[in-house]
Amino acid sequence: MVIPSILEHAHTLAGRAVEEGGVAVDATVGNGHDTAFLARAVGPDGSVVGFDVQEKALAEARECLEAEAPAASVRLVHAGHQTLARHLDEAKQGRVGAIMFNLGYLPGGDHSITTRPETTRQALKASAEVLRPGGVITTVAYTGHEGGKAEAEAVETWVSALPQEQFRALSYRFPNWSNDPPRLFAVEKRRDA
Ligand SMILES: C[S@@+](CC[C@H](N)C(=O)[O-])C[C@H]1O[C@@H](n2cnc3c(N)ncnc32)[C@H](O)[C@@H]1O
């Protein structure tokens, strides 16, 4: 297929923003696929910090990382992404190249444990602050589960209100997808701001 899927496009954008030896954040670790992607992108001299509220997710992610990015420097934090700024040491603040959010529930896990609009908004706000100029936040929002549509709308509201002189923002979706289309939002901190 020529048109990238939502997840492929998120990876392309995050991959363009991270540098070897740089810093990246996975705000929703889940099974660890995005964490492993970021770990490979920053390489052995870079570092990745990942957040999840479920120990089960972090355990799955550790296995995924062992298989897919064994040499990487990854710190997995068992805490909500809304605490992101508190868990990033000062040297990393303002240096993060890419921050990935993949909202919703853990595939294969408890569907009642999902990301929430208010904490997601807090985490996005903190992310915009720790991002380096030229860095990108990608957010994939699903609309098919309870609360998913409201969360996607909350992300869209937050993204749409960002000052154009400081951030470039993108919304990516498939308009003829009839059932609960997922959305990708991306935000780039301008270098010239
Ligand atoms: C769709 S999954 C992420 C999938 C993951 N990116 C992957 O590649 O496998 C969403 C994850 O967000 C986690 N989550 C829910 N609330 C959270 C919060 N406040 N902070 C961080 N993670 C949270 C869930 O536990 C779940 O594992």
Image: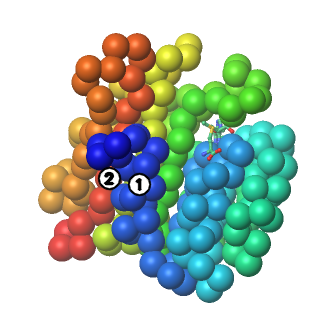
Task: State the separation of the CA atoms marked 1 and 2.
Answer: 5 Å
Residue 143 locus on image (x, y percent): 45, 21
Residue 166: % across, % down: 22, 60
Front-lying residue, 72 or 26? 72
Q: Could you tell which of marks 1 and 2 lies nearer the N-terminus?
A: 1
Secondary structure at numbered mark 2: strand
Instruction: Give the image quadrant in which the ligand numbered 1 is located.
Output: top right
Q: In the image as oriented, which residue stretches furthest toward the front? A: 1
Q: Residue 167: x percent and y percent?
A: 24, 57
**Quick check: 189 left or right of 100?**
left
In this rendering, is residue 55 above or below 91? above
Q: Which mark is residue 137?
A: 1
Q: Image quadrant of residue 137?
A: bottom left
Location of the N terminus (image quadrant): top left
Residue 35 location (% of width, % of height): 63, 58
In the image, what residue type sits under mark 1?
A: Ile
Q: Which residue is mark 2?
A: 187
Q: State if disc 2 and disc 1 touch (CB < 8 Å).
A: yes
- How many residues crowd mark 1 within 10 Å: few (<14), some (14–19), many (20+)? many
Please name whichever residue, 131 or 29, is drawn nearer the observer in this view of the structure.
29
